[in-house]
């Protein structure tokens, strides 16, 4: 296998009937797929100008940290509320079944800092929209948003239309 899609596992009717879940952890099960995903992210990332990579908990950490390492830039964790110990900013956003909150350390982002934002999945766009808002609240500039998988029929890209958005693998209406 040499296409990233070959490693993404589709699980029908999870977490509920009618949903075709795309499991990115199939990539993590294979060293060659993990290397391929990071290499692909690096190739796309090099099209952007940025000072740091920010990754959304938790799988955004898995893909974002090695990307930041390869590019020699800092990694900024965007965490679930209550997990960061220092002074932070918080954003609450809507999920299809409730509400969630994320946070970033205040000193991780400085005014004018250019940030490439990354998560494993772009679905409805709420998490990435909230993360981008936090970065901007702290004076940072989101120069691009990357995802490993995009579920394009869920319309997340529309919430992020003011940003340059790239995805490695796209699923539409499947």
Image: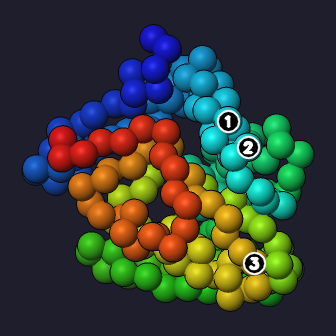
Look at the image and tell me whether residue 162 can be seen. yes
Residue ranking furthest to the right: 72
- Residue 31 vs 70, above or below: the answer is above
Residue identified by numbered label 3? 140
Q: CA distance from mark 1 to mark 2?
A: 5 Å
- N-terminal of the two: label 3 or label 2? 2
Q: Nearer the viewer, residue 33 or 167?
A: 167
Which residue does the numbered mark 1 point to in the structure image? 43
* Residue 103 x %, y %: 64, 78
* Above or below: residue 40 compared with residue 105: above
Q: Say whether marks 1 and 2 touch (CB < 8 Å).
A: yes
Which of the two marks, 3 or 2, is nearer to us in this view?
2
3D distance between C-alphas at marks 3 and 2: 19 Å
User: Of the residues under marks 1 and 3, which one precedes in the sequence?
Assistant: 1
Image quadrant assignment for residue 33: top right
Question: Which structural element holds mark 1?
Answer: helix
The quarter holding residue 108 reads bottom right
Q: Name the spot of residue 7 as percent of width and height, x first.
A: 42, 24
Determine whether, in the image, residue 155 is placed left or right of residue 104: left
Residue at x-position 45% and y-position 52%: 121
Identify the residue position indicated by label 2 in the image: 46
Instruction: Answer yes or no: is residue 104 visible.
Output: no
Q: CA distance from mark 1 to mark 3?
A: 23 Å
Give me the residue at 67% from left, 82% from top. Answer: 136
């Amino acid at each position: 296998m040499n296409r990233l899609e070959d490693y993404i596992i589709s699980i029908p009717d999870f977490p509920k009937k009618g949903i075709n879940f795309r499991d990115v952890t199939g990539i993590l099960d294979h060293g060659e797929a993990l290397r391929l995903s990071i290499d692909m992210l690096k190739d796309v990332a090099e099209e952007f100008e940025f000072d740091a990579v920010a990754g959304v908990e938790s799988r955004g950490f898995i893909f974002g940290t090695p990307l930041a390492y390869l590019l020699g830039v800092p990694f900024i964790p965007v965490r679930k509320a209550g997990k960061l110990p220092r002074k932070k900013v918080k954003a609450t956003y809507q999920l299809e079944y409730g509400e969630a909150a994320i946070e970033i350390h205040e000193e991780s982002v400085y005014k004018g800092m250019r940030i490439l934002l990354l998560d494993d999945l772009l679905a409805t766009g709420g998490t990435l929209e909230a993360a981008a808002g936090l970065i901007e609240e702290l004076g940072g500039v989101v120069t691009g948003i990357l995802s490993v998988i995009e579920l394009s029929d869920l319309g997340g890209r529309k919430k992020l239309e003011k940003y340059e958005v790239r995805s490695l693998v796209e699923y539409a209406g499947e």
